[in-house]
Image (spheres, rainbow, N blue to C red):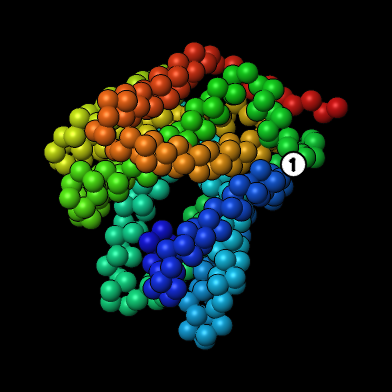
Amino acid sequence: MTFLALPWFVLVTTGSPGKMSLVLAAEIAPMAILGIPSGVIVQRIGARSTMLLSDFARAPILASIPLLHSAGMLSFPLLLGLVALLGCFMPPYYASQRTILPELVGEDERMMSQGNSLIEGGTAFSALIGPALAGLLIPFIGAPNVLYVDAATYFVAFVLVLAFVPRRKALVASMRPKVLSGVRFLLGDKPLVPLAAVVVAFGFFMPGVSAGLPVYAFTEFDGSARIAGLFYAAVSAGALVGSLVAVMAVRKTSPLRLSGLAMLAFVVPLWVLPFLPPWPVVFVALFAAMFCTPLINGPLIAVLTSRTPDELRAMVITAVISINTLAAPLGFVAAGLMIERWGVARSSPPSLRGLRGWPWSTEASSCAIAMSTRSASPRLPSHG
């Protein structure tokens, strides 16, 4: 719900789209600045403890925003600070979601692929339901009160993890990891470098697709907000269904092969978009493309996790997630420049070539990288 309720709250209380953009940037900035260093914390206190700490801390932080607003004490600089504080917990939490899987399901890559795909599905479900629920609640109770509801969901998550995620004996590392240990390990491990590159490539490409959807709906479908909403629904629904299929598919296909084939399948539906089909065709194309994303991300992250030594696992995954996050703004900028220069699809022949060539070149190279990566035992870090 935060994705809609927080920017809507800023718009209602300030009336400034510029300030709304600053708030969104303040939430993302800590991921770029603190993402890699936060891996040390995850590695030292454990994934379960990190998730509990993150959920328990974010509930009062988010609730303080409407509370201070109602008391007339919420200045804009204070709002930026609170939102940035919220963002500080995002990188370690996301990394903990992935690194806790070996503790729960073991070291088998197929089992971890299934677990990661289910996480992808849960994320897609929340992205589908959360903004829709916020959109229904805001007219009735207002954006500030929706933030209270959203804060309560963090507490619910805390209780669920506390009750249902078993405590595991903390790993006693044979070395004391340094801040950049995860990055150094990634750069020094030839099998893992291309896998991490694929994840980062998606971090660059997907924001561009996301940025283009509202412009596409606005310029090609008479400014219909309803159609724009349907496009985003197709994205989330496709990822949700794909996550369920990925759980079954990985039982019969090796994780890397499944991921590589899904990359090829991902790009095919997107080729229809520059030809300006009717909106139902666009809906189906987006659904089909996003259907493939859990079949790509789940297995890739599982392989990254399983082939990293225990004492560096959290730091490696946090580093990949952080670099992926840094790639996202570049994807937004690149998409904006392309749309500004050529339009969404038909302003000129080069625009057609550009919109078709961008996803094709990105996904074809990613597929080649993933398919060429061979199974290898994880290289243990040196202790010198």
> Is residue 153 among the parts visible in the rendering?
no
Looking at the image, residue 76 lies above or below residue 210 = below
**Residue placed at 42% from the left, 39% from the top?**
337
Q: Where, by quadrant of the figure, is residue 365 drawn?
A: top left
| Farthest residue, direction right | 384
Q: Secondary structure at mark 1?
A: loop
Q: What percent of the width, then of the height, locates residue 182?
A: 68, 35
Mark 1 Cα shell of 10 Å, populated few (<14), some (14-19), many (≥20): some
In the image, what residue type sits under mark 1?
Val
**Residue placed at 38% from the left, 27% from the top?**
358
Name the foreground residue: 350 vs 21: 350
> Is residue 296 among the parts visible in the rendering?
yes
Q: What percent of the width, then of the height, locates residue 343?
A: 30, 38
Please name the residue that numbered disc 1 is placed on.
179
Name the foreground residue: 314 vs 237: 237
Looking at the image, residue 349 lies above or below residue 223 = above
Name the foreground residue: 78 vs 249: 78
Q: Where, by quadrant of the figure, is residue 116 drawn?
A: top left
Q: What percent of the width, then of the height, locates residue 108?
A: 51, 28
| Farthest residue, direction bottom | 71
